[in-house]
């Protein structure tokens, strides 16, 4: 036990190395949050373009561009996308955290597009027709009627995508970005102990993911409760 405590102390306590883990964790969460915002905006826009094309036949070229983008991004490893953006596209830029966030945001957008597409397709076709019959334009109908309902339906899988981002961003250490996945290697070079730095980083990832998973469960329960209440209200009116 004494030896294990000594190894833990070297990996976490001595020279305030716990601060390194916290700083890395903060950068991990920052990258994931920025990437999530970029991914949601990009994904919803692409899903909306496809939805409008499906319902009205408009935006044909934009739809082809979106589908091409989704195919390329989903068909290539994210680590290669990271290297291309870090070493080529943004080689002049010295902000690794933002480059990592942009990379994962662009990657996540392709997956969010499929999630949002499912959300749009869950909306009854009559919603668009009803909006147009009230004199609303296609965009006005999308903005005020379709998008709010679609995002509500897609909220649980979107939050799950954020949880996946927290874990997937660990590869940014490959290009030297200072995140939680990078910290064990830095501490290992000082303590020559590989086990405890890896276990500590794994434990921190696990704690964050479990906490976020609990938040997801709360969201799912509230949405389910809201659906039941709406269903009860409709049945009550029907009576």
Image: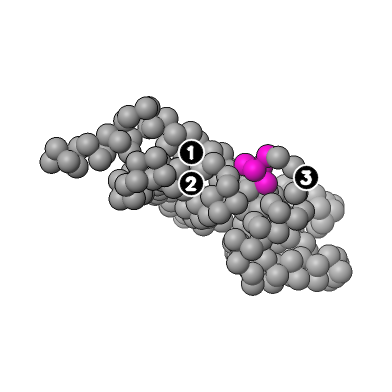
Identify the residue shown where x is 42% and y is 37%: 21
Queried whether the magenta region covers residue 22, the answer comes back as no
Tell me: residue 118, above or below residue 166.
below
Circle number at residue 24: 1
**Quarter occupied by the N terminus:** top left
Mark 2 or mark 3, which is nearer the start of the sequence? 3
- Vertical relation: 136 (above or below) 60: above
Please name the residue shown 44% across and 47% down the image: 185
Residue drawn at 32 percent across, 47 percent down: 193
Secondary element type, mark 2: loop
Q: Which label sits on residue 92?
A: 3
Task: Indicate which disc, 1 or 3, sits on the residue closer to the N terminus.
Answer: 1
Q: Name the residue: 80% across, 71% down.
A: 64
Image spot of residue 164 (x, y percent)? 49, 55
Q: Position of residue 3 (x, y in %)?
A: 17, 41
Q: Position of residue 231 (x, y in %)?
A: 47, 54
Q: Are marks 1 and 3 in contact (CB under 8 Å)?
A: no
Picture quadrant where residue 117 is located: bottom right
Mark 3–mark 2 Cα distance, whole angstroms, equals 22 Å
Residue 102 x %, y % = 68, 49
Q: Given contact means CB atoms under 8 Å apart, are the residues at marks 2 and 1 in contact?
A: yes
Cα separation between marks 1 and 3: 24 Å
The residue tagged 2 is 182
Give residue 229's mark: none
- Seen from the viewer's position, the closer of residues 76 and 222 is 76
Cα separation, mark 2 vs mark 1, equals: 8 Å
Q: Residue furthest top?
A: 16
User: What range of the chain is rendered magenta?
Assistant: 95-99
Q: Which circle, 2 or 1, is nearer the viewer?
A: 2
What kind of secondary structure does the magenta stretch mostly adopt? Answer: helix
Task: Please indicate, yes or no, whether residue 219 appears anywhere in the rendered image.
Answer: no
């Amino acid at each position: 036990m004494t030896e294990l405590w000594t190894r833990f102390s070297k990996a976490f306590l001595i020279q305030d190395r716990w601060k390194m883990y916290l700083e890395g964790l903060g950068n991990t969460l920052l990258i994931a949050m920025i990437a999530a915002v970029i991914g949601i905006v990009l994904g919803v826009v692409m899903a909306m373009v496809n939805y409008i094309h499906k319902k009205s036949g408009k935006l044909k070229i934009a739809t082809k561009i979106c589908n091409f983008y989704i195919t390329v991004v989903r068909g290539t490893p994210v680590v290669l996308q990271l290297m291309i953006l870090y070493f080529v596209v943004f080689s002049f830029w010295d902000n690794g955290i933002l480059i990592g966030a942009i990379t994962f945001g662009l990657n996540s957008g392709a997956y969010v597009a499929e999630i949002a597409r499912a959300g749009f397709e869950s909306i009854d076709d009559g919603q668009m027709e009803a909006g147009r019959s009230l004199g609303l334009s296609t965009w006005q109908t999308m903005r005020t009627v379709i998008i709010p309902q679609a995002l509500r339906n897609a909220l649980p899988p979107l939050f799950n995508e954020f949880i996946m981002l927290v874990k997937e961003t660990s590869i940014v250490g490959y290009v030297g970005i200072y995140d939680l996945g990078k910290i064990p290697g830095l501490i290992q070079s000082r303590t020559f102990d590989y086990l405890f730095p890896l276990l500590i980083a794994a434990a921190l990832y696990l704690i964050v993911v479990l906490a976020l998973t609990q938040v997801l469960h709360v969201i799912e329960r509230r949405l389910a409760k809201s659906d039941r209440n709406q269903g009860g209200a409709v049945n009550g009116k029907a009576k």
